[in-house]
Image (tube, rainbow, N blue to C red):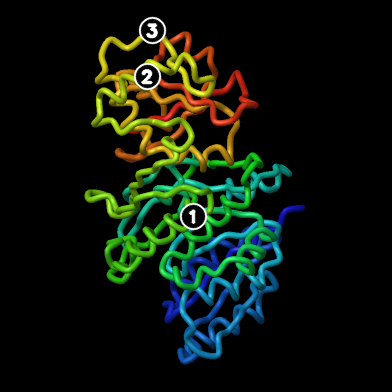
Amino acid sequence: MSKKLSLITPLYNTPLNYLEELKQQILPYNEKIEWVLVNDSPFNKELVKYVDELKGNYEFIKVHSNIKNLGIYKSYVAGYELASGDYCGILDHDDHLDLEEVVAYLEAENDFDLLYTNEYKFDNQNKFDFFDKPELDILSTVFYFYTHHITLMRTQIVKRILKEYSAEKYSSIFDICLMLDYLREFKNIEINVVHIDSYSYGWRVHQNSTALNIDQKPAAHIERIMKVEEFFKNFDETPIVSIDKDIQYLVCSEFFSGYDLYKIPFANNLEEVERWFGLLADDQYVSWIGSQPESLDLIVEILNTSRRVPFKYLSEYTNAPILIVPRSSYIYFQSEPSYQRHLPNVPFILKRDLNFVSINNLQGLLFNVKPNTIKDEVNIIVIK
C-alpha cells in the first residue's frame, strides 16, 4: 500500500486487556498500519513490561517512553514526532476500532486531506448511542467537533502545525485545537474531505471516561471558548463566543463582519433594516433572491441568522455566494441526511447550485463574498 497510516495512542495506567483488544483489532492490517504507543506512566512496571514485549514481537509497533508523567499533550506530540505514515490519527487507549473500510479506502489509492468515520459508544455489555455524522462543512465544524475519532490527517501538515503553533495551553482539548489549526492550513485551497459512513470507531464508556460525561473536563469549556476566539481572530473576525446552555460541547458565536462587509444593520432597528433593504438594488454584492418578501419580519429573521455567520472567515475558503434563507425554506432540506444529522442551533452549509434554488423557488439574501464569484454554486446557510 502506498499510503501508510500511523495511529498514535498515549498510555497512562492503561489496563493490559484494553491494549490486547486494540492489538487484536489492528493486527490483521499490520503490514499497512504503524501503531505508535507513548507510555506516559513509566512507574507502572506491569505496563512497561507489556509494552516492551509488544515492541520486541511486532515490527509495526513503535514505542516512546516518557521519563516521567508529562501529560496527554506532550504524549501526543511525542507520538506524532515518531509517526512516519502519510496519514495519521489519534486512537485512545481504552477504545475500539474497525479498520476494514478505512484500509480499503487507502488501498484504492484515493487521495484526500481529511478522512473521518462514524462512531458509537460501548460498555461491557453492548454497543449503543450510534452517531451517524453529518458531511463536514467549513462552517459547522468550527462550532462542534463532530469528526472526533477516527480522523485521519496528512502527517507532514500535522508535524508542521505542532512546530509552528503552541497548543500546550489547550492540552485538555488537543484534538479540537489540532482540527482547527489543520483547517487553517487550507485557506484559499479546497480541502478534500472523505466521510466513511460506517461505524469504525467505538468510545468505551466506564467510570473515568469522558464518553460517559463530557463535564468531567470542566476546564475544556473555557479552553474551547478561548480557542475559537483565537481561531476567528486570525480571519479578522471579532466574535462573541459562548457555550450552548443545553449542549455542552457546542460553541455559539455571534459575528460582526457582516456589518463591516455589507453594512448589515442590527435587526432591532426596523427603520434601519427597511432602509438597508431598500438599497439592495444598488449593491452588487448583496441581493434578494426570489419574490419580494411580504413582511419585514422575514428580512429580520434572515438578518438575525446572518449574525451567526463569519463572512470574513468564509471568504477565505470559498468564492461561491452565501445564501441565507428563512426557516420556511427548510422543508426542502429536512429529508436529507446532512440536515437530519446536525445538532440544533448550529449554522451549517448545504452546497447547491442555482438550478436547485430556482426549482424550489427559494428566497433569501444572497451575499457574494468575492467579486470573482462562482456563479453556479451556492452555499446555503441553515440553522435547525
Image coords of residue 147 (percent x, y): 47, 49
Q: Residue at x 66, y 68 (%)?
A: 83
Q: Which residue is mark 3?
A: 291
The mark that comes first in sequence, 1 or 2, is: 1
The answer to whether residue 255 is left or right of residue 246 is right
Above or below residue 305? Residue 18 is below
Q: Which residue is mark 1?
A: 231
Q: Residue at x 64, y 41 (%)?
A: 188
- Displayed quadrant of residue 26: bottom right
The answer to whether residue 25 is left or right of residue 278 is right
Amino acid type for the residue under numbered disc 2: Phe
Within 10 Å of disc 3 (Cα), the crowding (few <14, some 14-19, many 20+) is: few
Foreground of the two, 194 or 14: 194
Within 10 Å of disc 2 (Cα), the crowding (few <14, some 14-19, many 20+) is: some
- Location of the C terminus (image quadrant): top left
Local secondary structure at mark 1 = helix
Image coords of residue 138 (percent x, y): 51, 41
Amino acid type for the residue under numbered disc 3: Ser
Q: CA distance from mark 1 to mark 2?
A: 32 Å
Q: Is label 1 in contact with label 3 (beta carbons under 8 Å)? A: no
Image coords of residue 340 (percent x, y): 36, 32
Above or below residue 11? Residue 379 is above
Local secondary structure at mark 2 = helix
Local secondary structure at mark 3 = loop
Q: Is residue 384 visible?
A: no
Q: Is residue 217 visible?
A: yes
For residue 15, the mark is none
The mark that comes first in sequence, 3 or 2, is: 2
Foreground of the two, 369 or 279: 279
